[in-house]
Amino acid sequence: VMPLETMEKVRAQVEKGLLVVALRRPVEVPTFKEHDAQTAKLHEIVEGLFPEKVGTTPRVIGKGVAFLADEQDVPRILQSVGIEPQLIADNPFQWIHRAGADYDLFLLHNPLPDQIHYEICSFRAKGCLEIWNAHTGKIEPASYQIEGGRVVAGIGIGPNESRLVIIRRDKPAEGLDSVPTHPEKTVTTVNGD
């Protein structure tokens, strides 16, 4: 579902050079007013803008390009045009990213109900990394490295917990250390008697 006005704006921006990656084609408009006529116009724009099948050759429209892709293909498509992912990890957390005037903020969430999730995360950002506990507001210490214009850190999050990773561009990088490849964990304690 997409308003006709929005689809018209998307098409205009693609003609000017925008790259669009869609996971599915919009099929109708969210209105009762002139629903059939607007839906027909939406279909006309969608047919001219997006390929018919997922994973096929993208359509070049004016100076722009429109892809129809599966979700797992989006990083590959973006990399093919020189756009690196915001977060790279083998088995990433659920996450969202927001950029502010002098910071990048990543909200990371571990949805696992009974396991700590630990990942080496590579963030497309520059600056000083801070990890904030989303539940307590406490800033937790973090070791990180700068590698090729990215901030790399090992991050562990408890079951059903979240962390805010803030990479501050207004503060010089500090706390640079080697990033551990796995979390330290006490397996058992042995007392000698």
Image (cartoon, helix red, strand yellow):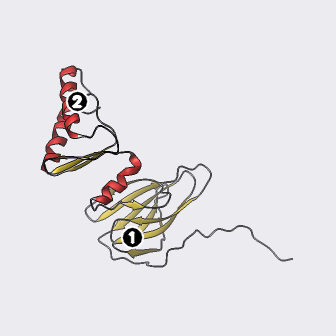
Q: Is residue 70 above or below residue 180?
A: above
Viewer-nearest residue: 35 or 111: 35
Label drawn at residue 151? 1
Q: Is residue 159 above or below residue 192?
A: above
List the single residue furthest toward the right: 193
- In which image quadrant can residue 59 be found? top left
Residue 103 appears in the picture as rendered: yes
Q: Report the residue marked by disc 2.
A: 43
Which of discs 2 and 1 lies nearer the camera? The answer is 2
- In which image quadrant can residue 41 be found? top left
Please report the residue visible at 19 percent of the width from the left and 42 percent of the height from the top.
10
- Tell me if 4 is positioned left or right of 117 in this view: left
Residue 82 locus on image (x, y percent): 28, 62
What quarter of the picture does the N terminus occupy? top left
Task: Look at the numbered disc 2 and give the secondary structure of its residue.
Answer: helix
Viewer-nearest residue: 145 or 62: 62
What quarter of the picture does the C terminus occupy? bottom right
Q: Amino acid at mark 2?
A: His
